[in-house]
Amino acid sequence: MTDVTSGHVDVLQTLFHSDQGGHEQVVICQDRASGLKAVIALHSTALGPALGGTRFYPYASEADAVADALNLSRGMSYKNALAGLDHGGGKAVIIGDPEKIKSEELLLAYGRFVASLGGRYVTACDVGTYVADMDVVARECRWTTGRSPENGGAGDSSVLTAFGVFQGMRASAQHLWGDPTLRGRKVGVAGVGKVGRHLVEHLLSDGAEVVITDVRAESLRAITDLHPEVTVAADTDALIRTEGLDIYAPCALGGALNDDTVPVLTAKVVCGAANNQLAHPGVEKDLADRSVLYAPDYVVNAGGVIQVADELHGFDFDRCKAKATKIFDTTLEIFARAKADGIPPAAAADRLAEQRMAEARSR
């Protein structure tokens, strides 16, 4: 998947003429009364209605917001395909600081825009939006997931997202070291918020040594107060340089793997929850050249979307967990294909996803 965030973005050129385009529909939304400015991007509905969350973020420019929506929606097509879901990929972004402009009126206006698509796009939570927000959106739009259990939803999807990442780590350990356990391995987790904190619990339960970092001191304290054996790194730069690190788990925002970080990684595996970890095309080859095993982010972090997709059919946690457990097998299959074809795992994952989407379009 090619990133379109670098440099100036000509939206029409990207959509109609570039390799990273191919989106079916992009909707620009505005409601001046509430202050809503949003972009809804539908990359593909080949496998079914586009499914993906709503990101609420203070972008530096409208062009950055559009670019993010394009990248994220494309990523959701690949994620949903490899998760075995009957959904295509979509994503929405709301422009602005949620701490300053989020309101009931704005969320209701946003819900009306999603509803106007008639079910072609199903929304959910993402960075800056929460279960309570989806409850509000759902008052105007029945194609809303990630709602609270009190309102017929599945609640917080971070639990199964973390579980899926843990399965990806187990598969990475199986592939590299011949044993699907993290016992005795040193794992660095960058970002211990909604997903990262659950991941830490899985790692500790499996016997791993855990090092964490986060820009929020309160998130760090929440873990170290409960688990004083967990080590805290000063920042992400210090974390990725930690001596003896076996696995690095980026669990914050994207772009964690770039020209500055990849050369100094001490870990032999990268497997984390963050979306769009590869900052630009070619990073996956840089990782392979350094013999760093990369578990593609959109494969291992699919537990959350598995959960919200299931909500559309009457949520059953055990059923979702069983589906998320299969992330272990999918990750191993990708590693095997990558080795057989002599390509990085990210490229092998893309091929598998594209194959499923092409087969759906040909039916």
Image: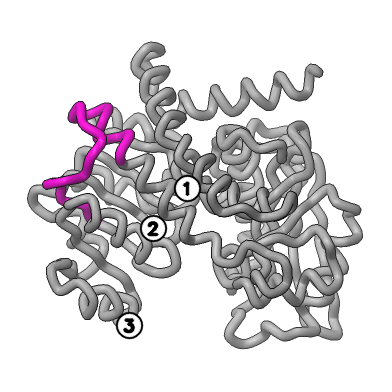
Direction from residue 258 to residue 12 in the image, left or right? right
Dividing the picture into quadrants, the one containing residue 284 is top left
Nearer the observer, disc 2 or disc 1? 1
Q: Where is residue 7 in the image (x, y as percent from the top left)?
A: 55, 51
Q: Reply yes or no: does residue 171 show up in magenta.
A: yes
Q: How many labels does the image show?
A: 3
Of labels 3 and 1, earlier in sequence is 3
Is mark 2 in CB contact (under 8 Å) with mark 1?
A: no
Q: Position of residue 348 (x, y in %)?
A: 46, 24
The residue at which mark 3 appears reads as 218
Residue drawn at 21 percent across, 44 percent down: 182
Q: Which of 280 and 277 is in front in this view?
A: 277
Residue drawn at 60 percent across, 66 percent down: 155
| CA separation in Å, label 3 and label 1 | 24 Å
User: Is residue 280 in view?
Assistant: no
The residue at which mark 2 appears reads as 251
Q: Which of 284 and 324 is in front in this view?
A: 324
Of labels 2 and 3, earlier in sequence is 3
Specify the quadrant that holds the N terminus. Answer: top right
Q: Mark 2: which amino acid?
A: Cys
**SS for callout 1:** loop
Check residue 301 in the rendering and tell me which mark sits there, or answer none.
1
Range shown magenta: 170-188
**SS for callout 2:** loop
User: Is residue 299 in view?
Assistant: yes
| Rendered view: 52 above or below 360 | below
Q: Mark 3: which amino acid?
A: Glu
Q: Where is residue 302 in the image (x, y as percent from the top left)?
A: 52, 46
